[in-house]
Image: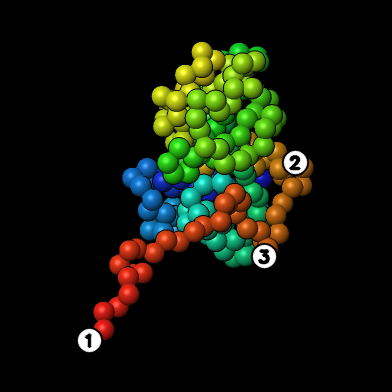
Amino acid sequence: MSCILHIETSTDVCSVALSQDGMCLMSKEDRNGPSHASVLAPFVEEALSFADSHAIPLDAVAVSKGPGSYTGLRIGVSTAKGVCYGRNARLIAIPTLELLCTPLLLYGEELPENALLCPMIDARRMEVYSALYDTGLSAVRETQADIVDANSYLEYLDQHPVFFFGNGADKCRSVLVHPNAHFIEDIYPSAKYMFPLAEQRIARVQYEDVAYFEPFYLKEFVTTLSKKSILPHRTQ
């Protein structure tokens, strides 16, 4: 087994964890809003200091690759790359929606055998980033951006109980009223749940190119100008 530093910054939650031999050794988490720029570096430093003080060499850095917050993903991936360069460690990318499923599958209540999991990340208004997985975490439908209405996911809801969760699911609760639609609260991506997925990728020798890896944004970041900035300047 390997010692892995885990970094998760895809939503408002910022978290870091350190694992070895299939166990989480330590974790730090901030749920007070998008403050990744200020809290991530100290969290990473604390995790690396823990590894150094216990003479544990770092083998890899796992980072949540998206989709999610454009700024959060860039901060997380940039930090992960920096540690990889500094420690000569491998880089592992974990799909954020797979990560969202992990606490439910590992620590949640037993699900029906034919259940589908639909992790959702908020993407403004009634849009979410989502995917569908079976209980073995095999993709039934790949990640995409969905504008949610009463007809969304019907082809799956008509055949399976579907469990919706993540910070995009709350706003869909009043819209998805199918009897097979179930909502689970307080599920969010966290670094402390990354190690099973990271270890799978190590076993498959599935690493990323540190120099060229980019987050999976799904949609390009678009800046908007305020009304004041586009008004013509008054001449004197």
The residue sitting at 59% across, 19% down in the picture is 157
Residue 98 lies, with reference to residue 175, above or below; the image says below
Three-letter amino acid code at the position of disc 1:
Gln
The residue sitting at 63% across, 58% down in the picture is 214
Q: Which residue is mark 3?
A: 211
Instruction: Select label 3 or label 2 by which is in front.
Output: 3
Three-letter amino acid code at the position of disc 3:
Ala
Q: Nearer the viewer, residue 155 or 30?
A: 155
* Circle 1/circle 2 CB separation < 8 Å: no
Three-letter amino acid code at the position of disc 2:
Ala
**Residue 88: percent from the left, percent from the top?**
66, 62
Neighbour tally class for label 2: few under 14, some 14-19, many 20 plus, Cα within 10 Å? few
Looking at the rendered structure, which numbered label has been put on residue 236? Answer: 1
Q: Which residue is mark 2?
A: 203
The residue sitting at 62% across, 30% down in the picture is 132
**Residue 118: percent from the left, percent from the top?**
57, 29
Disc 3 secondary structure class = loop
Q: CA distance from mark 1 to mark 2?
A: 69 Å
Neighbour tally class for label 1: few under 14, some 14-19, many 20 plus, Cα within 10 Å? few
Instruction: Select label 3 or label 1 by which is in front.
Output: 1
Neighbour tally class for label 3: few under 14, some 14-19, many 20 plus, Cα within 10 Å? few
Disc 2 secondary structure class = helix
The residue sitting at 59% across, 61% down in the picture is 81
Disc 1 secondary structure class = loop
Examine the image and state in which quarter residue 201 appears.
top right
